[in-house]
Image (cartoon, grey):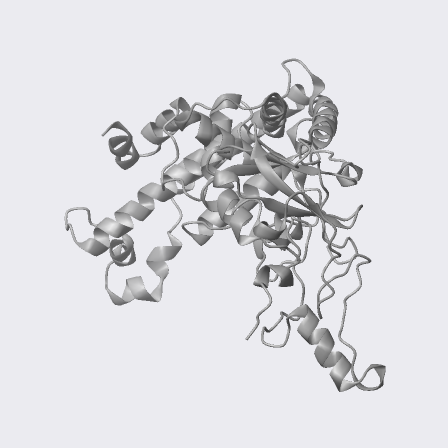
Amino acid sequence: MHFQPFSLLLGVPPPHLVSATVAIPAPAIPGYLTDDGKSSELSSGASGSGSEQSAQKEALGLSRVSVPKFARVCFVQNGANAVAQVAHVINTVRSSKTRKETVNSFIQKTLQINFDRFGFDLDDESNILFPGLCPRIHSSWNFYSLLALVPSLSTLTAMIEMLERMNIEWQAQLDERGVKGLTPRPLEAAALAGATYEVILLHPEHFLANGAPLPIFDSTTNQWVCYTVQDGELKDPSGNRLAPFQDPADPAVRRAALNPLFFTINAYLKIEYHNSRYSSQFPSCTVEIIELIKKLYELIYFLPAPQLGSDGWEIDEAIRLLEMRKTAERKRKRSEYGPRRSPRTSSPLAKSRGSPSGDDREERVDTHKLTTENLDRLEEIIVEEHVKAASSLVNDPKTPLEERMMLGAWFFSPCAGPYPPLTKGMVAAMSSSSEMGSRYVTS
């Protein structure tokens, strides 16, 4: 009994049949996308006899192997792959729903790097590789960080030029109108057109080990080209680097273009983690890309602060003084007429217990009773305090850039611990927030 190699079903010739460049057309399998973007379906009824259909199925190896109804195309290999896995650029896995919502708010309201102004969350299509990644590339990228998917040199340069220009306009707007009149960072959606991406290897000795090839489909020549790791880069048999590629997803299907700034954040975190633990000598092209990624990452974290003496600064000072007067007036009225009755003390639950503070006693955490429930709740309170303090610091333009970048990396990393890094700002914030927070930080 003869079975067709499963790799042929995926449009990938087995390694022992490939020496260099193989002219194999894109697979015309039912439900898959052909080169012209049309879905190929097997003939039925009047279009062909049963024997012809059987022969067609046998030629495609479909007689005993089921084929998925809808095709998936690997983002890197650019070919149909039945086992391609959908992936998020910025990971959505978080320890809690609150942590995930904080990351959403950090992207949309603080960094303001989402091009769609109608709302954003981590499941937005601009953050999803919905054509998918083949398992080898997905695990090497997402789980082991053997490689990084990065914007190409041309895209990085274009993004840097755009953010430098936009940040200057953003700062000028703040100096003119103040914080209350500040509009979102003026990103240009046109910059997404024609964005291309590359693959850089962080651990070339482990990716495609022992000379294993990575077949990539070249739609311009209608050929599969096998790339191997040479001198720390992916190269074809002629020694040419893997060229930058575009998102293979159909623009008519994708509702939002991929955001290169999300790839920049993902790549920066992988590179920083790699450099903190390993000493690698990268090729010159990879070094150039890494330097541009670091520069773009800093521009992403830019927050405008009003310059002393500007119109915006005077407006903000006037608003601050007005708020101080309102606060002082409220305090004066409370001292004159007495404190208002707490809404909690008038609740039916509190009245039923015959004590105005009965309801409060139920909600307070008794730290003297070291039960598992109390310890878990105490841990939750401490974590919440740290998250609030970190969120406040990254939203403050006065926080040093390096500190904001460290806290931002903690927000973005799904594998980070429950507590943010103890920067100077975090220590000061937690020490002044509460006695419990102070004890935790200094312990």
Taking the view exactly as shown, the residue that stands out farthest to the right is 46
Rendered location of residue 246, percent (x, y): 73, 43
Residue at 47%, 34% (x, y): give it.
205
Rendered location of residue 112, percent (x, y): 64, 37
Count of number-bearing discs:
0
Rendered location of residue 301, percent (x, y): 58, 29
Residue at 61%, 27% (x, y): give it.
293
- Towards the viewer: 204 or 146: 204
- Towards the viewer: 279 or 212: 212
Rendered location of residue 24, percent (x, y): 73, 55
Q: Is residue 357 left or right of residue 257?
A: left
Position above or below: 347 against 67: above
Q: Quadrant of residue 200?
A: top right
Taking the view exactly as shown, the residue that stands out farthest to the top is 309
Q: Is residue 196 left or right of residue 316?
A: right
Q: Is any part of residue 328 visible from this angle?
A: no
Position above or below: 295 against 227: above
Quadrant holding the C terminus: top left
- Towards the viewer: 330 or 437: 437
Q: Quadrant of residue 64?
A: bottom right
Q: Quadrant of residue 160?
A: top right
Q: Is residue 352 left or right of residue 427?
A: left
Quadrant holding the N terminus: bottom right
Residue at 66%, 36% (x, y): give it.
237
